[in-house]
Image: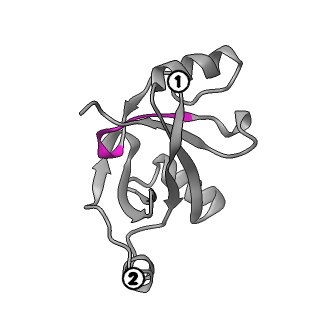
Amino acid sequence: MKVLGVDHIGVAIPSRLENLLSFWFTGLGLDSSDPEVIPDQQVETIFLRVGGIAIELISSTSSDGPIAKFLEKRGPGIHHICLQVDDIWGFLQRLKGVGCRLIDETPRRGARDKLVAFIHPSSTGGVLIELCQSPPQ
């Protein structure tokens, strides 16, 4: 099992505000993916490619969704760091075996059709970590 690299950095934003998107698109000149809604996570995401990693802009599609709650507590900003792994199931078993607190004990489908699982910040020094694995090609 290997961590293959940083896949993306998730940034919680209050909404798809034009002035905020203007910063990323016009100001920095970054290209984006098409918006994607992930119903079970109550979010809409847009990925911006920056070299070998991405920045994921995440907005809530529900006033009581996890991103809405995050924004209410902490305001906009970095939400999580996502690590791409080659065996998400194996990593979850290993982490569980060493006592890590997992938000997801079983991977689920996330954005870009990847398998994802989150590790609770209490086990990572305060940072929400997402693991992802690309679908087989």
Query: Residue at image x 66%, y 26%?
Result: 101
**The disc label shown at residue 80, or none:** none
Residue 28 painted magenta: no
Query: Residue at image x 57%, y 49%?
Result: 81
Residue, disc 1? 1
Magenta stretch?
A: 111-118
Residue 114 painted magenta: yes
Q: Residues within 10 Å of mark 2 (few under 14, many from 20)?
A: few
Query: Residue at image x 59%, y 41%?
Result: 129
Horizontal and vertical percent position of residue 41: 40, 42
Amino acid carrying mark 2 in the image: Ser
Horizontal and vertical percent position of residue 74: 65, 60
Q: Is residue 73 above or below residue 41?
A: below
Q: Residues within 10 Å of mark 1 (few under 14, many from 20)?
A: few
Foreground residue, 1 or 98?
A: 1
Amino acid carrying mark 1 in the image: Met
Residue, disc 2? 22
